[in-house]
Image (spheres, rainbow, N blue to C red):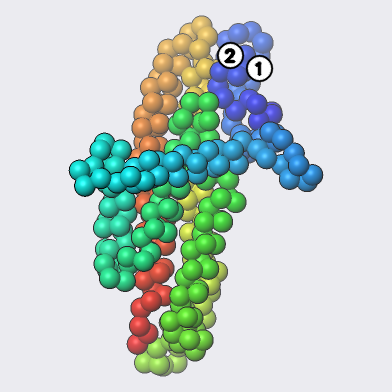
Amino acid sequence: MSSDQTLAFETDCHIFDGTGCGFPAPGLHSFTFDPIFTVGSFEFNKPMLLALLGTVAIVWFFWAAFGKAKVVPGKLQMIGEAGYDFVRKGIVYETLGKKEGEKYVPLMVSLFFFVWIMNLWSIVPVAQFPVTSIIAFPAALALVVYVLWMYLTFSKHGFVGGMKNITGYDKSLGGVLPLVMFLEFMSNVFVRPFTHAVRLFANMFAGHLLLLMFTIASWYLLNGIGIAYAGVSFVLTIVMTAFELFIQAVQAYVFVLLAATYVQGALAEHH
């Protein structure tokens, strides 16, 4: 099945139409897109386009909201300030403190809104695809956080202190210290960045599959006696869409919260 058959209304197959066609279940093909255009070996596809449009939309919004900020804010500035303060006070200040965290607010705000908008594409008509369900995008964002985390760790504590920070060195552990240091090293250097990316990717991947499943089922069942079942599936599609809206925001929040936690761990004094 080609990527053009991702959406329910793009197939003529129904359960009781007499053709004997099977249910066009979503799968990995639902995450594969033909290139919009190609330059040499570089292929520009739909997820890349959505990521680009999302980036432009975010830059435009904050430019429009704060480009000419007023003492008495307009509606757009009020919305921008509410979103900015949510990340600044609700995540960064709570994790890093006001004094230490202020310098990291722009990065965390950027990460939050980028992840959120990339997730939101899943329920936008025509787009209907969460960019973060492609592992390359969460991996790239997690890599940014990972590089910052490592840089702060070693720039603040030096090489020896940084290694102690990463390995959880504590001489009071006695004989189990080597094992603890090995496990902490593996966790911090390899597992954390991996799970940071996969947590976001897996949730968006699974959410998109569920939405596709119920949407395609609604169309597939829309024939003969299956219309009654199609109605149930359509209701579940609406419910899943509302639930996905909640998950999209939660995943953006969790991604940035973990990023702030990693930064806090890098700056923490080792004892």
Residue at position x 52%, y 62% in the image: 144
Q: Is residue 183 above or below residue 95?
A: below
Name the secondary structure under disc 2.
loop
Q: Residue at x 41, y 16 (%)?
A: 231
Q: Nearer the viewer, residue 190 or 46?
A: 46
Residue 21: mark in rendering: 1
Q: Residue at x 63, y 21 (%)?
A: 22
Label annotation for residue 143: none
Please state the horizontal and vertical placement of residue 259, each as a whole percent of the image.
Answer: 42, 62
Residue 11, image quadrant: top right
Give residue 171's quadrant in the image: bottom left
Residue 120: where, in percent of width, then height? 44, 38
Q: Which residue is mark 2?
A: 14
Question: Regarding mark 1 in the picture, which secondary structure is present there?
Answer: loop
Q: Nearer the viewer, residue 5 or 144?
A: 144
Callouts 2 and 1 close, C-beta under 8 Å: yes
> In the orientation shown, which residue stands out farthest toward the left?
72
Crowding at mark 2 (Cα within 10 Å: few <14, some 14-19, many 20+): many
Name which residue type carries label 1: Cys
In the figure, 100 relative to 23: above or below?
Answer: below
Q: Is residue 125 visible?
A: yes
